[in-house]
Amino acid sequence: MEDHSKIVGEGLKKMITKLVSMSKADKHDVFNDISWPDQLDDNQFWISRHLISLYNTPLIEQVSEEELYRLSKEECVNFFSLNVHGIRELLLDVMQYIHQPKFEVVSEFLHHFIDEENEHMFFFAKFCQKYAGKIYDDKFLKYPTDNTSGNVRLFFVFMRIWTFEMIVDYYNSQMANDKSLHPFIQEINGLHHKDESRHIAFGGKLLQSVFKDLLELESSETINSIRTYTQNYIKNRMGMFYNPYAYKAAGIEDFFSMRNVLLENEGRREMHKEILKGMLNKLYDYEIILDKNIYS
Ligand SMILES: [Fe+2]
Ligand SMILES: [Fe+2]
């Protein structure tokens, strides 16, 4: 028997009311309001230089500026593609909870969440198709799902959503303010960041509350396996940014070994720590992880 009786405490209730009114006030029509440039110049950075997956390794010094532009375009398309796939997965997960018993208070917020994520999937997919003629498939973007139920499953679903959103939001918020990027690329990143800040506020609070109940109700063995799954999931998600097919499209010859080399690279580990810092601090505060250094 599933019990979600304690998913919404008073703090979360107040937050939901506020977030719903913010969503209404910030409502825009992305299907009509975005002005899409006919094309974007290939001779420019499509993601920020410091977000390219070779950054902070000696490899970045071995490629010309033109080759970096090319790689940044492929990694931009990869980043937006992983958003498309991530959103489809999270929508499938969220749909199972809306208007179920005990989700009454959350359901109105979930309507806005679903609405906004549908818009995000639309503009990310359109960007990929319009400017690159492709969406990268999700071969390197999948993670095995779990076979749990009840509040453990609820935790996993919203943990996967929240950690994914936190990682993506690091990239979005950096690029929304990077004046070296095309204004339209800044705009798309900014648009996503604005909606995501509400989703992240909600998800963090929900996770904290659900995990608190799990700590009281579940065995230490279950809690340990939840912690391990969470850490592995986060590390796996960071692997999404090393798509061999993006390297191939950018003209890198050893594209498969490039992924493996970079995933083992110390400089890249340092970058991961920087990207994940805010999220790991929160997970540590919520007691969901016991060590902020998940790469140790
Ligand atoms: Fe989104
Ligand atoms: Fe979101």
Image (cartoon, rainbow, N blue to C red):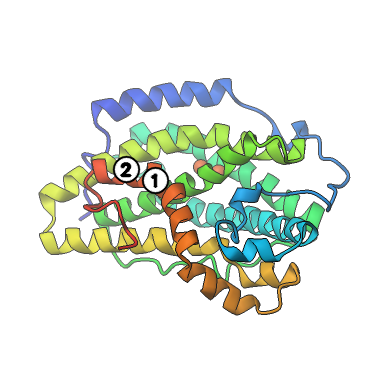
- Residue 281's label in the rendered image is 2
Is residue 237 depicted above or below 181 in this figure? below
Disc 2 crowd, CA 10 A, few/some/many (<14, 14-19, 20+): some
SS label for mark 1: helix
Q: Position of residue 295 (x, y in %)?
A: 34, 62
**Circle number at residue 277:** 1
Q: Is residue 32 visible?
A: yes
Kind of element beneath mark 2: helix
Q: Quadrant of the C terminus?
A: bottom left
The residue depicted at 41 percent of the width and 52 percent of the height is 273
Q: Amino acid at mark 2?
A: Asn
Q: Nearer the viewer, residue 16 or 249?
A: 249
Q: Where on the picture, by quarter, is residue 63?
A: bottom right
Question: Does 72 sit left or right of 276 as displayed?
Answer: right
Residue 291: x and y, percent?
A: 24, 53
Q: Is residue 102 above or below residue 150?
A: above
- Return the residue nearer the eye: 268 or 147: 268
Name which residue type carries label 1: Lys
Asked whether disc 1 touches disc 2, contact meaning CB atoms under 8 Å apart, the reply is: yes
- 45 sits to left or right of 144: right
